[in-house]
Image (spheres, rainbow, N blue to C red):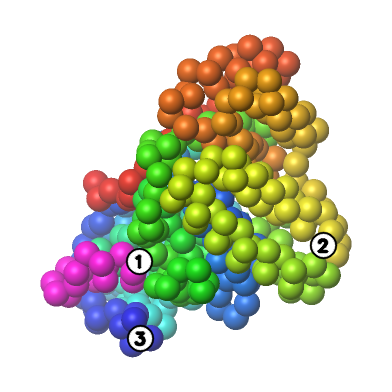
């Protein structure tokens, strides 16, 4: 798609209300490091979730007076000033592509089905939900827009809010970032992963172990920035491409051992990159490491194909085939809850895509 295709039609004066549910996603190959205007330094691939989502309603109405605010933002029905900066930056970033936005007041009402700012990618689902409402608004005057174009444009916009949000438009698997291992891949938007996927990944489960709900001390934006002059950056970007190729193969063949090896290595690499940044920092907690050890022992002893991944935070995502759900839930009850009785869980699974409400 050429650049002009991303310029939205003139919606000036069009009032509209749009309401969307966008799920979060969990990366298997991690996006960590970017250049220019949200161009990823390496390709990434993710599972879309289903129960961890953001619901956002936007009412677009023409601005009548200069005194009208550009937008208002409510989370769970309450004005949330701490999110204003992030939303304003997002709207400013997409303004060159959606110029009529400036002539409208946006009343944005959001709610999350899970704790925000805790390393469960709430920025992915929240930015994707806003982008869906905006492209849906354009669709009101652009009736020729196909479903495919709708999704490409939405993913393009979402990317400008949060890179990982570009992937929240597609389930069950999405990929973002140009790579020679996927012909149609793009740096500017995510695409649905249309390669062969073995049935072992159907309804793949993701249980999130919430170790800490507090806001992260270092934002992802800062983490990406620290990759700019990271001593291991070049090798890391090369490795991510290699891992992309390997995971594509394991998804096709159902080679679960290889899948586990890559997914866990990606998670640990992400945190190793943080610890070797300048200044260095760490986002995991002692419980994160203890639970990782428990998983490893459990997998070795029971031969259950359970693995973990981490986002930019201390919480752990357990990933496992649907057929092993009962075994993993027993493991959680018998081994994790016993040691960490106050830990919370979200039992999720791979989902198919955002929904219009
Ligand atoms: O989309 P951002 O800027 O919040 O970065 C997300 C980065 C990771 O969640 C750590 C990895 C990923 O690919 O989702």
Residue appearing at x 74%, y 69% in the figure: 235
The spot of residue 139 in percent (x, y) is 20, 69
Q: Which residue is mark 3?
A: 2
Badge nearest the viewer, 3 or 1 = 3
Mark 3 to mark 1: distance in Å?
Answer: 15 Å
How many numbered callouts?
A: 3
Numbered badge on residue 154? 1
Q: Is residue 76 left or right of residue 317?
A: left
Q: Identify which residue, 181 or 9, lies in the foreground.
A: 181
Mark nearer the N terminus (3 vs 2): 3
Inspect the magenta stretch and tell me whether residue 148 lies in it: yes
Label 3: state its secondary structure: loop
Mark nearer the N terminus (1 vs 2): 1
State which region is magenta.
Answer: 138-153
Residue appearing at x 14%, y 74% in the figure: 144
Label 2: state its secondary structure: loop
The spot of residue 261 in percent (x, y) is 65, 44
Residue 219, can we see it?
yes
Mark 1 to mark 2: distance in Å?
Answer: 33 Å
Mark 1 CB within 8 Å of ligand 1:
no
Q: Quadrant of the N terminus?
A: bottom left
Q: In terms of image quadrants, where is residue 296?
A: top right
Relative to 84, is 41 above or below?
Answer: below
Q: Which residue is mark 2?
A: 277
Q: Is residue 352 left or right of residue 30?
A: left
Numbered badge on residue 265? none
Q: Residues within 10 Å of mark 1 (few under 14, many from 20)?
A: many
Q: Is residue 270 left or right of residue 152?
A: right
Residue 54, can we see it?
no
Residue appearing at x 59%, y 40% in the figure: 257
Mark 3 to mark 2: distance in Å?
Answer: 36 Å
């Amino acid at each position: 798609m050429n650049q002009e295709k991303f310029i939205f039609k003139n919606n000036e004066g069009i009032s509209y209300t749009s309401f969307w549910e966008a799920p979060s996603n969990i990366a298997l190959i991690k996006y960590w490091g970017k250049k220019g205007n949200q161009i990823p330094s390496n390709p990434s691939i993710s599972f879309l979730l289903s129960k961890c989502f953001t619901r956002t309603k936007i009412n677009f109405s023409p601005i009548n007076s200069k005194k009208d605010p550009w937008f208002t933002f409510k989370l769970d029905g309450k004005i949330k000033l701490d999110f204003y900066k992030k939303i304003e930056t997002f709207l400013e970033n997409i303004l060159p592509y959606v110029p009529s936005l400036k002539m409208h007041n946006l009343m944005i009402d959001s709610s999350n089905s899970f704790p925000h700012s805790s390393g469960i990618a709430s920025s992915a689902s929240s930015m994707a939900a806003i982008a869906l409402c905006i492209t849906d608004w354009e669709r009101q005057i652009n009736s020729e827009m196909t479903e495919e174009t709708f999704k490409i444009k939405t993913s393009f916009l979402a990317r400008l809010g949060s890179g990982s949000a570009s992937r929240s438009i597609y389930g069950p698997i999405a990929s973002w970032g140009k790579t020679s291992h996927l012909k149609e891949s793009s740096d500017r938007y995510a695409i649905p992963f249309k390669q062969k996927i073995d049935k072992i990944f159907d309804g793949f489960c993701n249980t999130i172990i919430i170790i800490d709900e507090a806001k992260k001390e270092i934002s992802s934006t800062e983490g990406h920035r620290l990759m700019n002059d990271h001593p291991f950056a070049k090798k890391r970007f090369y490795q991510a491409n290699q891992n992309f190729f390997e995971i594509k193969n394991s998804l096709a063949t159902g080679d679960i051992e290889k899948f586990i090896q890559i997914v866990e290595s990606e998670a640990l690499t992400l945190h190793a990159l943080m610890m070797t940044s300048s200044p260095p920092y760490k986002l995991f907690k002692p419980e994160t490491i203890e639970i990782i050890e428990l998983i490893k022992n459990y997998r070795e002893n029971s031969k259950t194909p359970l693995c973990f991944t981490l986002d930019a935070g201390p919480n752990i995502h357990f990933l496992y085939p649907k057929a092993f759900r009962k075994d993993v839930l027993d493991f959680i009850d018998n081994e994790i809850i016993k040691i960490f009785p106050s830990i919370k869980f979200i039992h999720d699974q791979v989902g198919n895509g955002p929904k219009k409400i």
